[in-house]
C-alpha cells in the first residue's frame, strides 16, 4: 500500500472514530468488533483497520485474527492495487494487510520481558512459579502412618445356659460400634494433652527443621495447637463396616509411627475405661438392692427363731390342730356319757351309785373340755405366765412371721435373677477396641503431592483469571 493510500485510510478511520463511535468505544473491543462486522461488506479496508485496532486491545483473540485473515484474502482478490506498493516507493515488501506495519523481529529476551508484563503472566504464571518452587524445593516432606480399628461388643450367648440367655435377652446380635465416640476423643484436647506429656507433640512439630508453612508456631495458643493437631490426625469411619481408619502425619517415619501407635493405645484405654465405668455403676446399684433383700430375709429368719424359742414351739399350727383333736374327742366322750347317764336314770334312782359315778365322770369330762378350749384361747398350758397369749394368737403371729419369711425368700429369688441379668447386661455393654491393622512404618513421603497440588493451583489460577477478565470486560462495557 502506498503512503498516500495509507494516509487516506487513516483519515477515514479518524472520521469514523469521531462520527460513529461514542466516547470510550475506541477502547472497547466488543463495540469495535461489532462496527467492523457491519463494514466488512461495504468497506473491507476500513473494517480490516478496525480489526487491527481490536487485535491491539485483544492480542490473544483467535476470532479477530480469523477476521483479519479473511479480509486480507478478500482485498487481494477484489482490490489487488491496495496490496501492492507503488513503483516510486521503497521496494521492500509490504506487510500482508493494507495497513499492517512491519514490526521488527524481537529477540528471545525481549519476548520474555514482554510476556512477563502481560496480565496473564502476572496473575497466573508468576504465582505458579513461586508455588512450584515451594512445592519442589522448600516444602518439608510429610510421612503418614496408617492403622485400622474397630469396636466390638461380646454377644455373651456362648457363656450362658439357654434359659439365662433367653431371660437376659441375648440373641447374639451385637450392637453397632460407637465409632463417633472414638473419633471425637481422638480429636479432643484431652488426647492432645496426653500426647504433649508422652511424646512432646508441640516440641516436635515446632522444630526449626520444617518449613515455616508446615511447622507449628512455638508460641501457639491451645486453640491453634488443637487445630494444627487435627490437621495432622485424620480419622475416617466406613459406614458399612464401621472400621475406623486412623492416619497420623509427621516429618519423619519413626515419629509418625510413634504418634499413630500412641493414639491407638490411648483410644483403647479410653474405650475400656468408659465400658468399665458404665458396667460398674449398673452392677453397684443392683448389688445394693440385693444386699437389702438379703438383710430382709435374715431378719425374717431371726424373728421366726426368736418366736419359736420364746414359746418353746416348733410349729404352733400343728400344736393347735392337736388341741382341736383333743377337744373333738372330749366332746364325743361327753355325748356318750350323757347318753349313758340318761339310760341309768331311766332304770335307777338319782342316788344310785352307778348314776352318781356316771354324773361325776360327765362333769370331769366337761371340766377337761373347758380347760382344753381355754388352752386354744389362752396359753395356760404352754407357759407359766397367766397373761400369755392364746394358741390362736400364737398361730396368727406365727403365720405372719412365716409369711414374711416366704416373701423374703421370693424377693431373694427375684433379686438373684435380676443380679444375674444385670451382670450379663453390664458384660454386654463392655466395648473392646480391636486393632485390624497395626500402625504402619512409612517408607516414602506421601506429602506434599506435588503434581496434584500444581495442577490444582494452575486450574484455580486460570479460573480466577478468567473470572476477573469477564468482570473487567463487563464493567468496561457498561461504562
Image: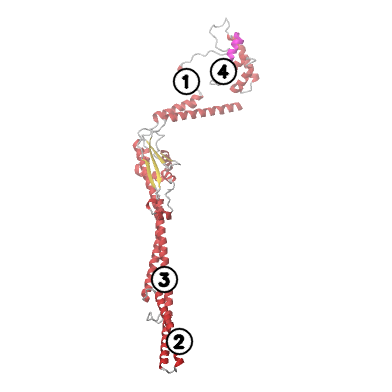
Residue 231 seen in this snapshot? yes
Q: Nearer the viewer, mark 3 or mark 4?
A: 3
Do labels 4 and 1 touch, CB within 8 Å? no
Callout 1 touching callout 2 (CB < 8 Å): no
- The answer to whether 420 is drawn above or below residue 305 in the figure is above
The span from disc 3 to disc 2 (Cα, nearest Å) is 45 Å
Q: CA distance from mark 3 to mark 4?
A: 116 Å
Secondary structure of the residue carrying numbered label 2: helix
| Residue that numbered label 2 is attached to | 339
Q: Main secondary structure of the magenta part?
A: helix
Estimate the x, y position of residue 280 in percent, counting from the top left: 39, 54
Which region is colored magenta?
A: 68-81
The residue beneath circle 1 is 113
Q: Residue at x 44, y 30 (%)?
A: 452
**Mark linked to residue 401:** 3
Q: Which residue is mark 4?
A: 66
For image coordinates 42% across by 63% down, the residue present is: 411
Q: Residue furthest right?
A: 19
Amino acid at each position: 500500500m502506498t503512503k498516500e493510500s495509507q494516509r487516506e485510510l487513516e483519515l477515514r478511520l479518524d472520521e469514523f472514530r469521531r462520527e460513529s463511535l461514542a466516547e470510550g468505544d475506541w477502547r472497547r473491543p466488543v463495540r469495535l468488533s461489532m462496527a467492523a462486522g457491519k463494514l466488512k461488506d461495504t468497506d473491507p479496508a476500513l473494517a480490516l483497520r478496525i480489526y487491527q485496532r481490536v487485535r491491539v486491545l485483544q492480542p490473544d483473540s483467535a476470532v479477530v485474527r480469523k477476521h483479519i485473515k479473511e479480509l486480507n484474502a478478500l482485498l487481494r482478490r477484489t482490490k489487488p492495487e491496495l496490496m501492492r506498493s507503488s513503483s516510486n516507493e521503497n521496494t521492500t515488501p509490504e506487510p500482508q494487510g493494507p495497513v499492517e506495519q512491519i514490526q521488527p523481529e524481537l529477540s528471545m529476551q525481549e519476548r520474555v520481558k514482554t510476556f512477563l508484563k502481560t496480565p496473564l503472566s502476572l496473575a497466573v504464571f508468576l504465582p505458579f512459579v513461586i508455588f512450584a518452587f515451594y512445592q519442589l524445593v522448600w516444602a518439608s516432606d510429610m510421612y503418614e502412618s496408617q492403622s485400622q480399628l474397630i469396636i466390638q461388643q461380646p454377644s455373651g450367648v456362648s457363656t450362658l445356659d439357654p434359659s439365662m440367655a433367653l431371660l437376659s435377652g441375648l440373641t447374639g446380635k451385637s450392637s453397632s460400634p460407637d465409632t463417633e465416640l472414638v473419633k471425637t476423643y481422638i480429636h479432643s484436647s484431652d488426647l492432645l494433652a496426653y500426647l504433649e506429656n508422652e511424646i512432646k507433640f508441640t516440641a516436635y512439630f515446632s522444630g526449626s527443621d520444617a518449613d515455616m508453612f508446615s511447622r507449628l508456631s512455638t508460641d501457639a495458643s491451645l486453640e491453634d495447637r488443637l487445630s494444627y493437631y487435627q490437621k495432622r490426625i485424620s480419622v475416617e469411619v466406613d459406614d458399612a463396616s464401621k472400621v475406623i481408619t486412623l492416619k497420623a502425619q509427621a516429618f519423619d517415619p519413626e515419629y509418625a509411627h510413634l504418634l499413630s501407635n500412641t493414639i491407638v493405645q490411648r483410644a483403647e484405654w479410653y474405650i475400656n475405661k468408659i465400658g468399665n465405668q458404665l458396667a460398674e455403676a449398673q452392677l453397684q446399684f443392683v448389688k445394693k438392692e440385693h444386699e437389702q433383700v438379703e438383710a430382709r430375709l435374715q431378719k425374717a429368719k431371726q424373728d421366726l427363731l426368736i418366736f419359736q424359742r420364746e414359746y418353746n414351739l416348733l410349729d404352733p399350727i400343728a400344736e393347735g390342730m392337736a388341741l382341736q383333736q383333743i377337744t373333738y374327742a372330749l366332746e364325743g366322750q361327753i355325748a356318750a356319757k350323757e347318753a349313758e347317764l340318761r339310760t341309768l336314770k331311766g332304770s335307777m334312782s338319782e342316788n344310785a351309785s352307778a348314776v352318781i359315778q356316771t354324773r361325776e365322770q360327765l362333769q370331769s369330762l366337761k371340766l377337761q373340755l373347758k380347760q382344753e378350749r381355754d388352752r386354744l384361747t389362752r396359753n395356760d398350758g404352754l407357759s407359766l405366765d397367766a397373761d400369755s397369749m392364746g394358741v390362736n394368737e400364737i398361730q396368727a403371729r406365727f403365720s405372719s412371721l412365716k409369711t414374711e419369711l416366704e416373701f423374703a425368700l421370693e424377693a431373694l429369688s427375684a433379686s438373684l435373677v435380676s443380679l444375674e441379668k444385670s451382670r450379663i447386661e453390664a458384660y454386654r455393654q463392655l466395648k473392646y477396641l480391636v486393632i485390624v491393622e497395626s500402625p504402619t512404618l512409612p517408607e516414602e513421603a506421601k506429602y506434599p503431592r506435588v503434581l496434584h497440588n500444581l495442577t490444582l493451583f494452575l486450574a484455580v489460577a486460570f479460573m480466577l483469571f478468567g473470572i476477573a477478565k469477564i468482570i473487567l470486560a463487563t464493567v468496561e462495557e457498561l461504562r
